[in-house]
Image (cartoon, coloured by chain):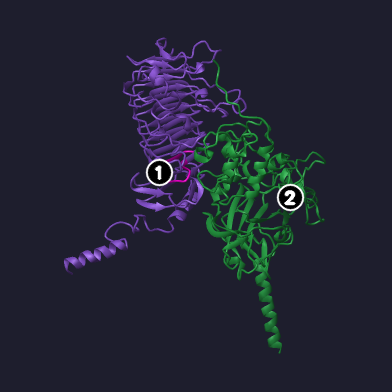
Chain colours: A purple, B green
C-alpha cells in the first residue's frame, strides 16, 4: 500500500471510528445511540456499593438522569474526558437528580443543562469531586440556574470541581449541614459559590473569579432553618466584575457586579486569610435582607432574622477593589473618597440586639458603614469595629469515608 | 366428518386454551419486572376496544393532574378479602396485592387511517370523553402508556408500560420513553415530545415524604375521590362504591374532604385554583415533599397565604422567576412567578418540572383568575432605622 493509500484508509477508518478510540460524529460526540438509556438503566439498577463507570467520550442526553438508590458512585474518566452534554435536553429540570444517601459523583462534566446541572436533595453524605458543571456559551440568563446544588444534605464535600456560566450560583449549598467546599474553581457565574441557610461550612482553597459575586453566604426567609457558622478562608477571590445576568427576582439578582465576598443576613461568619482583590463594588460586603429589595411585610416569615451578626473579617490580603461600586452602592464612591475600602457594611442593625458583632481586624483594611437605614446620609468609615469574637469557629470534620478517594 | 369435527373441537380448545393462558383474570405479581403489560392479566384488547377485567374499578378525580392534554383512564383492583383503610388527608392504606392502573391516551383525528400510529392527537372534547367504566372504544384513540402502581410487600412499585404500534400490548420501559407528537387544538398545531417517566422519575412525584422515601399513590385520596361517578351501583359516590365493593373501610358518615372539580365554572375561583394547584403541585410542594426546600406549599391543607406564595420571594427558582419578584402578587398574575412557571414550556423554568411539555392554557387561566381575585399589595419594607 502506498503512503497515500494508508492515509486514505486511516481517514476512512477514522470516519468509522477506527484509528483509535470510539466512533465520533462530526461534532465530536461519541456515536452510541443506546448510551442514555443504558446509563439510566444502570442508575435504576444500582445497589449500595455499586460504582457506575462512564468511559471517556462526549455523550448527548435528552432527559434528566435520576438516581434514588443509596451508596452509589458515578464516575467518569476525568472532567474533560467524560462529558455529558445536555444541549439537546427536552425534559427534566436538572442534568442529574439524586435522592440517595452516600452518593459520590466524580471525574466527569455536565454541560449545558436546561436547569440545574446536578441537584442532590434531602440526603446525607454527598461527595462531588472533580466535576465540571459548565454552560459552554458563556454567561447568559438562559443558562441553567445552579451548577452543583446539594440541598438539605447532611455532610457535603465538594472539591476540585469547576463551575462556569451558571445563571444563579455555580456551587450552591442550600439548607445543608456540615459542609466542606474546597479547591474548586468558580468562574463566570452570577454567584461563584453560595452557602445559603446552611450550618457549619468550611469554604477554602477555592478560586472565584469573573463572577458577579465571588463567594456568598446568605440567609433567605421562609425556610425551615436559618444558617450560621461558615468559615471562608484561604480562597482567591479576584475580579468578580461580571455583569449580573441573573433573572430578576432571583436572590442573586440583587448582587452588585464587583462583589468579592457577600455575607447577607447570615450569622457567625469568619472571613480570613484570603486573597481578595479588584472586586469593583467591594472586596467584602456585609448586608441585611433590607438591602436586597425583596423584603415585604406579607412575604417574609416573622421568625426570619434579616440582620448579619457576628461577622469576623481578619488577616485577608486585600488589593484594589471598590473603585466602581454597582447598583445602589454607586453613590457611595464619592462619599468614600473615590473608592470604597475593603469592607462595605449596609449598617442595618437589629435594634433589640446591643451589638451586631461586626468585627474587622485586618491591618489597614477599613470598614465603610453605608448607613442604609438613613439612605446613606451618615455613611462613613466606621472605626469602632476593631473587635474579635469570643471564640473562633471549629474546623468542619466529615465522616472518614467521604474524604477518601474511591 | 368425525375427524373434521374432532379437528374443529381441538382448534376451539386450542383457542380457548390460549385465551385462558392469556388470562381474563388479574394477576398480582409479587416480584420482578414483568416485561409486558399483558403479564398482569388486566385488560382484553379486542374488536376495537380495551376492556378491564373483573374486579377493576374505574375511578375519576375531582380535579386531575395535567399531562400534556392526555386523557386518562384509571382503575384500582384488589385481591379478594382485603380492603384499604380510609384516611382523611393522605393516600389510603392499601393492602398488599393492590394494582392501580392509569392509561394515558389521546383522541386521534377522525381521518387518521391508523389511530395507534397517528402522530397527530387532538384536544379532548366532551364528545370524545370516555368514562372508561366499560373500557375504551379505540376507534379514534392512540394508547400511549399504561402506568401501574403495585402494592407489594416491600411497598408500592411503579411500572411504566408503553403501548406498541399495533395497540395490542405494552412493554415495560423502566428508563422511560419519548414519544414525538403533534397536538391539534382547533387550527393550532404544536409539536411536542410526550415524555414517559423513568422509574425513578415516577418516585420523583410519588414520594411525597422525603424522610420515608416511600412511593405512594397521589390521586387515591379522599378529597380527590369524593364525587359521584358511574360504575357498579350506578352514578354514585366513588367512596361509597369502594365501600360497597369491600375495597375500602373506615369512611366516616360526614366530614369527608372534597376538592373542587376544576371544570366547575360555578365554583369559587379560589377553590378551583386550590384544587388545581393541589393535584398538580402538592406532591412536591408540601411540608415533606421534594419542593419543601422552596418554602412554597400548595397542598389543600395549607392556609397561610405566605406559604401559598403571597408576596413570597423565590428561593431557588433561578431563571424560573421570569424576571418577576414574588410567587404571587395579589391581583397581578402578570407579575406572579407561579403564573409564569405554569405557562412556560422551558424545562429549565417550567412547573411542574416533569410530565408536561405543553402549556395547560385552561389551568393557567384558572390560576390567573385566582390571583386576580386576591387582594392586597406586596409593600416593600425598608428596614428599621
Q: Quadrant of residue A269?
A: top left
The correct choice, above or below, for B129 with respect to B208 in the image is below
Label 2 crowd bin: few (<14), some (14–19), many (20+), radius 10 Å: some
Q: Is residue A270 visible?
A: yes
* Front residue of this view, candidates A51 and B276: B276
Secondary structure of the residue carrying numbered label 1: loop
Question: Outermost residue toward the bottom?
Answer: B1
From which residue to which does the magenta span run? Answer: A100-118
Q: Which residue is mark 1?
A: A135
Q: Compared with residue B103, is residue B321 higher up or lower down, i.e. above or below?
A: above
Q: Are marks 1 and 2 on the same chain?
A: no
- Pick whichever, B81 or B193, lies toward us: B193
**Can you tell which of label 1 and label 2 is closer to the viewer?**
1
Give the label on residue A28, or none.
none
Q: Which residue is mark 2?
A: B82
Q: CA distance from mark 1 to mark 2?
A: 54 Å
Query: Was residue B55 drawn as part of the magenta stretch in this picture?
Result: no
Q: Secondary structure at mark 2?
A: loop
Q: Position of residue A9 (x, y in %)?
A: 24, 66
**From the image, which quarter does the C terminus of chain A lie in?**
top left
- Percent coordinates x, y for residue A244 in the rendering: 43, 34
B210 and B236: which is toward the camera:
B236
x and y, in percent, of residue B331 in the image: 65, 35
Residue A165, picture quadrant = top left
Q: Viewed as shown, does residue B155 lie left or right of A154?
A: right
| Residue nearest the observer in this picture, B66 or A397 | B66
User: In the image, is residue A30 above or below residue A212?
Assistant: below
At 47% across and 52% down in the image, what residue appears?
A62
- Quadrant location of the N terminus of chain A? bottom left
Amino acid at each position: 500500500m502506498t503512503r497515500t493509500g494508508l492515509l486514505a484508509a486511516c481517514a476512512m477508518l477514522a470516519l468509522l471510528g477506527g484509528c483509535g478510540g470510539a466512533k465520533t460524529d462530526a461534532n465530536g460526540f461519541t456515536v452510541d445511540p443506546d448510551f442514555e438509556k443504558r446509563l439510566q438503566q444502570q442508575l435504576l439498577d444500582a445497589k449500595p456499593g455499586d460504582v457506575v463507570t462512564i468511559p471517556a467520550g462526549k455523550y448527548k442526553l435528552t432527559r434528566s438522569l435520576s438516581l434514588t438508590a443509596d451508596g452509589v458512585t458515578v464516575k467518569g474518566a476525568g472532567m474533560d474526558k467524560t462529558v455529558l452534554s445536555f444541549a439537546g435536553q427536552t425534559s427534566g429540570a436538572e442534568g442529574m437528580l439524586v435522592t440517595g444517601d452516600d452518593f459520590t459523583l466524580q471525574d466527569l462534566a455536565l454541560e449545558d443543562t436546561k436547569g440545574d446541572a446536578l441537584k442532590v436533595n434531602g440526603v446525607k453524605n454527598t461527595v462531588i469531586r472533580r466535576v465540571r458543571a459548565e454552560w459552554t456559551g458563556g454567561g447568559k440568563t438562559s443558562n441553567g440556574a445552579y451548577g452543583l446544588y446539594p440541598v438539605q444534605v447532611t455532610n457535603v464535600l465538594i472539591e476540585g470541581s469547576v463551575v462556569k456560566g451558571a445563571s444563579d450560583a455555580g456551587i450552591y449549598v442550600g439548607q445543608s449541614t456540615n459542609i466542606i467546599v474546597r479547591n474548586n474553581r468558580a468562574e463566570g457565574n452570577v454567584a461563584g459559590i453560595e452557602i445559603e441557610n446552611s450550618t457549619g461550612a468550611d469554604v477554602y482553597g477555592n478560586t472565584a473569579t469573573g463572577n458577579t459575586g465571588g463567594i456568598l453566604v446568605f440567609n433567605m426567609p421562609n425556610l425551615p432553618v436559618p444558617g450560621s457558622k461558615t468559615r471562608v478562608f484561604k480562597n482567591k477571590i479576584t475580579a468578580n466584575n461580571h455583569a449580573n445576568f441573573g433573572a430578576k427576582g432571583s436572590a442573586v439578582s440583587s448582587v452588585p457586579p464587583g462583589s468579592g465576598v457577600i455575607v447577607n443576613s447570615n450569622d457567625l461568619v469568619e472571613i480570613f486569610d484570603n486573597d481578595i482583590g479588584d472586586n469593583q463594588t467591594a472586596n467584602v460586603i456585609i448586608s441585611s435582607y433590607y438591602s436586597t429589595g425583596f423584603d415585604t411585610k406579607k412575604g417574609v416569615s416573622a421568625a426570619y432574622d434579616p440582620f448579619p451578626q457576628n461577622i469576623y473579617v481578619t488577616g485577608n490580603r486585600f488589593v484594589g477593589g471598590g473603585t466602581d461600586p454597582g447598583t445602589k452602592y454607586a453613590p457611595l464612591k464619592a462619599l468614600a473618597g473615590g473608592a470604597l475600602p475593603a469592607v462595605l457594611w449596609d449598617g442595618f442593625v437589629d435594634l433589640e440586639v446591643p451589638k451586631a458583632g461586626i468585627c474587622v481586624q485586618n491591618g489597614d483594611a477599613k470598614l465603610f458603614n453605608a448607613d442604609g437605614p438613613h439612605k446613606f446620609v451618615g455613611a462613613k468609615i466606621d472605626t469602632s469595629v476593631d473587635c474579635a469574637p469570643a471564640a473562633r469557629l471549629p474546623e468542619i470534620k466529615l465522616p472518614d469515608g467521604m474524604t477518601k478517594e474511591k | 366428518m368425525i375427524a373434521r369435527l374432532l379437528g374443529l373441537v381441538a382448534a376451539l380448545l386450542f383457542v380457548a386454551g390460549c385465551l385462558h393462558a392469556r388470562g381474563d383474570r388479574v394477576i398480582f405479581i409479587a416480584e420482578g419486572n414483568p416485561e409486558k403489560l399483558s403479564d398482569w392479566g388486566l385488560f382484553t384488547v379486542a374488536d376495537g376496544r380495551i376492556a378491564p377485567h373483573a374486579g377493576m374499578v374505574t375511578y375519576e378525580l375531582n380535579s386531575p393532574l395535567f399531562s400534556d392534554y392526555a386523557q386518562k383512564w384509571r382503575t384500582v383492583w384488589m385481591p379478594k378479602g382485603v380492603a384499604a383503610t380510609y384516611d382523611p388527608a393522605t393516600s389510603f392504606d392499601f393492602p398488599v396485592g393492590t394494582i392501580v392502573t392509569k392509561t394515558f391516551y389521546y383522541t386521534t383525528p377522525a381521518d387518521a387511517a391508523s389511530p395507534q400510529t397517528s402522530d397527530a392527537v387532538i384536544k379532548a372534547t366532551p364528545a370524545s370523553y370516555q368514562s372508561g367504566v366499560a373500557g375504551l372504544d379505540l376507534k379514534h384513540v392512540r394508547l400511549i402508556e399504561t402506568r401501574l402502581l403495585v402494592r407489594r410487600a416491600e411497598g408500592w412499585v411503579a411500572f411504566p408500560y408503553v403501548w406498541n404500534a399495533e395497540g395490542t400490548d405494552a412493554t415495560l420501559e423502566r428508563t422511560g420513553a419519548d414519544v414525538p407528537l403533534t397536538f391539534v387544538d382547533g387550527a393550532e398545531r404544536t409539536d411536542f415530545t410526550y415524555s414517559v417517566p423513568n422509574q425513578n422519575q415516577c418516585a420523583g412525584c410519588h414520594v411525597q415524604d422525603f424522610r420515608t422515601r416511600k412511593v405512594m399513590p397521589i390521586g387515591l385520596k379522599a378529597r380527590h375521590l369524593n364525587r359521584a361517578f358511574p360504575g357498579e351501583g350506578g352514578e354514585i359516590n366513588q367512596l361509597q362504591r369502594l365501600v360497597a365493593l369491600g375495597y375500602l373501610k373506615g369512611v366516616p358518615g360526614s366530614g369527608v374532604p372534597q376538592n373542587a372539580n376544576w371544570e366547575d365554572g360555578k365554583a369559587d375561583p379560589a377553590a378551583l385554583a386550590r384544587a388545581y394547584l393541589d393535584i398538580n403541585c402538592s406532591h412536591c410542594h408540601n411540608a415533606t415533599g421534594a419542593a419543601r426546600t422552596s418554602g412554597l406549599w400548595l397542598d389543600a391543607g395549607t392556609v397561610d397565604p405566605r406559604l401559598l406564595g403571597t408576596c413570597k420571594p423565590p428561593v431557588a427558582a433561578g431563571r424560573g422567576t421570569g424576571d418577576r419578584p414574588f410567587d404571587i402578587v395579589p391581583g397581578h398574575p402578570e407579575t406572579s412567578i407561579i403564573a409564569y412557571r405554569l405557562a412556560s414550556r422551558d424545562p429549565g423554568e417550567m412547573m411542574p418540572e416533569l410530565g408536561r411539555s405543553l402549556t395547560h392554557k385552561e389551568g393557567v387561566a384558572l390560576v390567573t383568575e385566582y390571583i386576580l381575585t386576591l387582594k392586597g399589595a406586596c409593600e416593600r419594607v425598608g428596614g428599621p432605622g
